[in-house]
Amino acid sequence: MKINYNEKLKKLPPYLFIEIDRKKKEAIEKGKDIISLGVGDPDLPTPKHIIEAIKKAVVKPVNHKYPFGAGLLSYREAICKWYKKRFNVNLSTDEICALIGSKEGIGHIHLGFINPGDIVLVPEPSYPVYNTGTIFSDGIPYFMPLLEKNNFLPDLDIIPDDVLKKAKLIFINYPNNPTAAVMPKEFYLKLVEFAEKNNIIVASDAAYSEIYYDENEKPCSFLEFPGAKEVGVEFHSLSKTYNMTGWRIGWVCGNKDIVAGVTKVKDNYDSGVFQAVQEAAVAALTSSQECVENFRKIYKERRNVLVEGLRKLGWQVNLPKASFYVWVKIPKGYTSSQTVSKIFDLAAIVCTPGSGMGKSGEGYVRFALTVSVPRIKEAIKRISLIKW
């Protein structure tokens, strides 16, 4: 039997992180000691009090049924309290929908608002799902380069008028993956004005908002700014904040009508988030945040060791203010892919080619701070032995 794949699948680039994971597993099977600085999957364990919460929740018969709807009221109330305390943003429970991880909602929002031929403004380099969701909804991506000369912010002023007329959705992601950039308050204000003027929905991906390194420079929420809730929503996740990537729990919040659109798509695609996981998420959001503070200290130490080590080797790298990524310029005479391949083949270190997340990422590689300090020091030692 001849199997014919949907044309949309043929348009998709290989999912970068699946390819990276495949190569890593093959090398491990061959006995190589791999240091994985590629995929942004935290190595630190989920805090014990969250694990204890799910142990209690998982035995409740009520949690064994379909968890239809926008999520447990207790979960959405916890999100409201967390947003108020963290960002001084007032949310109501009908402005929130629970997600099976923010990735799922980011991929589904297109289906609620994008018709064939509509344009989606996609930053690049960026998280691949912004573009794949566009392809699946028959939308057209318009890529906004994130360049170092612009502090890795999209240049809204150069988007052509004919593109703006067809644009229905814009993605932003700060703290940024992969560049680790942070968006200044002035740009958020400009973005709200831009969205209002052009009738474009803003989808803010704030998955890394709690991984920052200076208490005086905490990342903002898009929803903090006047008019933001009228034009957009924010996606959030417990994955990186509480090391719960495998638990698949997050939310979308903001404009009530936009959230309702995402909820309607989900009602027709899935049956909601496992309620026991939602109860554990309540414990995460409402308990002491000391564990998150401790994680930040660990990532900060790792960041400092990696950046200092690479700089001593002559690599050009900025000190990230947030996220657990380090965005590094590659040696002259190499492409991003060639650099990553050489580091993998000669040093058994996995990192991510900037070009794999968008053509403007060419010239860079991304390192994830997802291994211990001794392993980072070992990685630096191995890289030092490579002749460029």
Image (cartoon, rainbow, N blue to C red):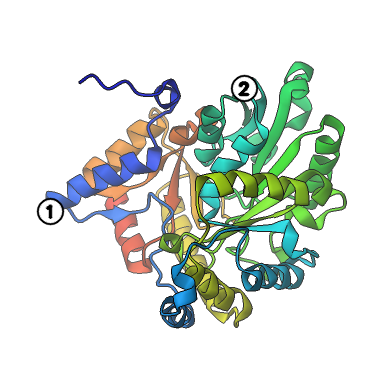
Query: Is residue 96 shown left or right of residue 23?
Result: right
- Looking at the rendered image, the quarter that the N terminus falls into is top left
Residue, disc 1: 31
The reply to whether the C-beta atoms of the residues labelled 1 and 2 are less than 8 Å apart is no
| Depth check, front residue: 176 or 280 | 280
Q: CA distance from mark 1 to mark 2?
A: 48 Å
Q: Position of residue 226 (x, y in %)?
A: 87, 52
Front residue of 185 and 303: 185
Amino acid on which disc 2 is placed: Pro
- Of mark 1 and mark 2, the one earlier in the sequence is 1
Specify the label residue 116 is tagged with: 2
Q: Residue at x 37, y 32 (%)?
A: 14
Q: Is residue 52 above or below residue 362?
A: below
Residue 106: quarter of image: top right
Q: Secondary structure at mark 2?
A: loop
Q: In what element is the residue under mark 1?
A: loop
Task: Check the picture and name the quadrant holding the C terminus.
Answer: top left
